[in-house]
Amino acid sequence: MITVHHLGISQSERVVWLCEELAIAYTLRRYERDAQTRLAPADYKQLHPMGIAPVITDGNLVLAESGAILEYLIGKYGNGRLAVGADCANFADYLFWFHFANGTMMPNEMSRAILANVGTAASHPLAALIKDRSDRAFAMVESRLGAVPYFAGSELTAADIMMLFPLSTMRAFAPRDLAAFPNIKHYLQRIAARPAYQRAMAQGDPGFKPLLT
């Protein structure tokens, strides 16, 4: 049986959502963040050498990293659903957005959150560089979602499950006003209407209101 070790308000929400979308049987174990540091508690850190979310266990297997976990679950338990095959016209789009989420967007937004937390002035060259990268990423996402309803094209895929977090929950750590991004806002409402997403958030973070506006 798969156990999803879910750290509250973290990237592990992706794994819960994927399991709900694919009706994969799983056990959910929730962990609260340390009250002082707001990081993972000691028992979560013991799961994996990196000590960060997400983590799943499947028998003797301990697996971390959002992308790796999603690919593992889709391949082993999901019969390839929510992935895009190499013979499909939108295969490259799927690959790009699946990896853009944690390859570019999350490092940008994490850097914004860290710099704000340590009080780095917005005029600092490093802060300006990171803001520029973040602004360009959001502009690219806005353009993409003006052309297609989902990141890989006409249907929801695992690329959406990867991309949603930096557009939604990550804004609890790196705030961003979406007033200038109507396509992103419409996209978030499409996701909000999905029963599987609603179930995942209700189970994983029952006291947290998803940032979908």
Image (cartoon, rainbow, N blue to C red):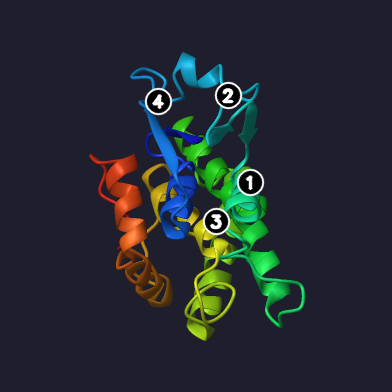
Residue 189: x %, y % from top left:
32, 70
> Which residue is denoted by mark 2 in the rendering?
51
* Residue corresponding to mark 4: 38
Q: In this view, does 199 lie to the left or right of 78?
A: left
Q: Is residue 92 above or below residue 134?
A: below
Label 4 sits on what residue type? Arg
**Which comes before the other along the chain, label 2 or label 4?**
4
Q: Which of 5 and 145 is in front in this view?
A: 5
Where is mark 3, residue-wise?
Answer: 162
**Disc 3 and disc 1: Cα gap in Å?**
29 Å
The Cα–Cα distance between marks 2 and 4, rounded to whole angstroms, is: 13 Å
Q: How far apart are marks 2 and 3 (CA)?
A: 20 Å
Name the residue beneath numbered marker 1: 125
| Left or right of 186, for residue 155 | right
In the rendered view, tell whether residue 173 sits above or below residue 144: above
Q: Which amino acid type is marked by label 2? A: Gly
* Number of other residues with Cα within 10 Å of mark 4, as a class: few under 14, some 14 to 19, many 20 or more: few
Local crowd size for mark 3, using a 10 Å CA cut-off: few (<14), some (14–19), many (≥20):
many
For residue 113, say whether it is visible: yes
**Left or right for 126, reference 55:** right
Is label 4 in a helix, a strand or a loop?
loop
Quote the CA–CA distance across marks 3 and 4. 23 Å
Please give the name of the residue rendered at 46% of the width and 38% of the height, measured from the top-left corner: 116
- SS at circle 3: helix
Could you say where residue 192 lies in the image, as x and y percent from the top left?
Answer: 32, 64
**Quadrant location of the C terminus?**
bottom left
Label 2–label 3 contact, CB within 8 A: no
Task: Kindly identify the amino acid type of the residue bearing the numbered disc 1.
Answer: Pro
Front of the two marks 2 and 4: 2
Q: What element carries label 2?
A: loop
